[in-house]
Amino acid sequence: MLRKNIGIALALGVTATIAITGCSGANTSGSATAHSGGKAGGLITIVVNDPSNPYWLTEGNVAKAEASKLGYTATVAASKGDVNTESTIIDTAIANHSAGIILDPANADGSIGNIKRAMNAKIPVFLVNAEINQTGVALGQLVSNNAQGAAIGAQQWIKAAGTQGSYAELYGLPSDNNAATRSNGYKTVISQYPNWKNVAKQTANWDRALGQQKMQSILQANPKINAVISGNDEMALGAIAALKQAGKTNVIVGGFDGSPDAVTAVKDGSLAYTVLQPVATFAKKSVDELDQYIRTGTKPAQEKQSFDCILITKANVDKMTAPFTYSG
């Protein structure tokens, strides 16, 4: 995922498969009911992690464009994965009498109190991308099907790398449930091939520069490594940079996200594959569901909504028509 501004195309061609993965949006005891059933309009506060990352940039831009289309004023703020920063943003949203909040949670546990505070202030909250460890707090949680995405990614990794060797894993931000879900999905597939040996598992917090640093350290200890599997594209691209510096261009690397730089890397062969998260689809849908709740008081049929990922390889990479948009 690049560190530069990207023009986000809003042609949302990704096919999303909705799967019931949790409880309904009904409030549980102790959680508040936000104000609903009124007129569209007002301020929608959108909170992403870090817009320097194209995934979160797309998330914020798509949500903001859809909010504007529906007649709202929208603002995008960044938590940088910090619960305290997120808390300040939520307090500002409350003080500004936001009509609603679209939130990519900073922490699966730590964000729960921030969400409850907004809901207690009668501001409806919908979550995108990352889940929290509690249902009945937010009105909706719209996320990628990370387990499904990890499985199809790991299966392609085996096809590309073979059935034996030494490999390393780059792990995402530990406070993000997506990191563990993807890692567990990789392990489930790779463990079926006992001749693969995991020689290193390093946390690189979804970051390209840190992924490069961690890969450099891994190579020092394991110079004969055969493959790398990564929790996201940014870490994978960092690993590729380190491998190129070391002259090890034959090492297989797999990613996850479907970012523009990863798409380019799949095309040139330096990245074996990426797994597209349909962030443009569920970012738009979260705003549509928030708008419906504001206008009619209608909650989504299911609080947790999971959108299937798409494997991107050389065979179908040309169907990526815009950032995080697949036309197949």
Image (spheres, rainbow, N blue to C red):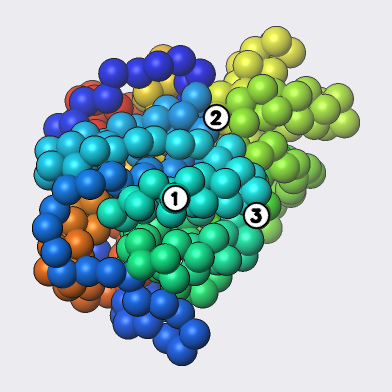
In the displayed structure, 64 sits above or below 308; it is above
Can residue 233 be seen here? The reply is no
Query: Mark 2 or mark 3, which is nearer to you?
Result: 3
**Residue 210: where, in percent of width, then height?**
70, 28
Residues under numbered marks 1 and 2 in contact, where contact means CB atoms less than 8 Å apart: no
Q: Disc 2 marks which residue?
A: 234
First of labels 2, 3 by sequence position? 3
In the displayed structure, 86 sits above or below 322; it is below
Disc 1 to disc 3, C-alpha distance: 28 Å
Residues under numbered marks 2 and 3 in contact, where contact means CB atoms less than 8 Å apart: no
Identify the residue at horizontal 68%, vertical 58% (top origin). Answer: 194
Q: Disc 1 marks which residue?
A: 95
Identify the residue at horizontal 44%, vertical 71% (top origin). Answer: 120
Q: Nearer the viewer, residue 211 or 292?
A: 292
Local packing at callout 1 (Cα closer than 10 Å; few below 14, some 14-19, many 20+) is few
Q: Secondary structure at mark 1?
A: helix
Local packing at callout 2 (Cα closer than 10 Å; few below 14, some 14-19, many 20+) is many
In the rendered image, which quarter is residue 68 located in?
A: top left
Identify the residue at horizontal 51%, vertical 18% (top origin). Answer: 3
Local packing at callout 3 (Cα closer than 10 Å; few below 14, some 14-19, many 20+) is some
Q: Disc 3 marks which residue?
A: 175
Q: Secondary structure at mark 3?
A: loop
Mark 3 residue type: Ser
In the rendered view of the protein, which quadrant contains the C terminus? top left
Identify the residue at horizontal 55%, vertical 29% (top origin). Answer: 234
Q: Nearer the viewer, residue 18 or 58?
A: 58
In the rendered image, which quarter is residue 290 located in?
A: bottom left
Disc 2 to disc 3, C-alpha distance: 17 Å
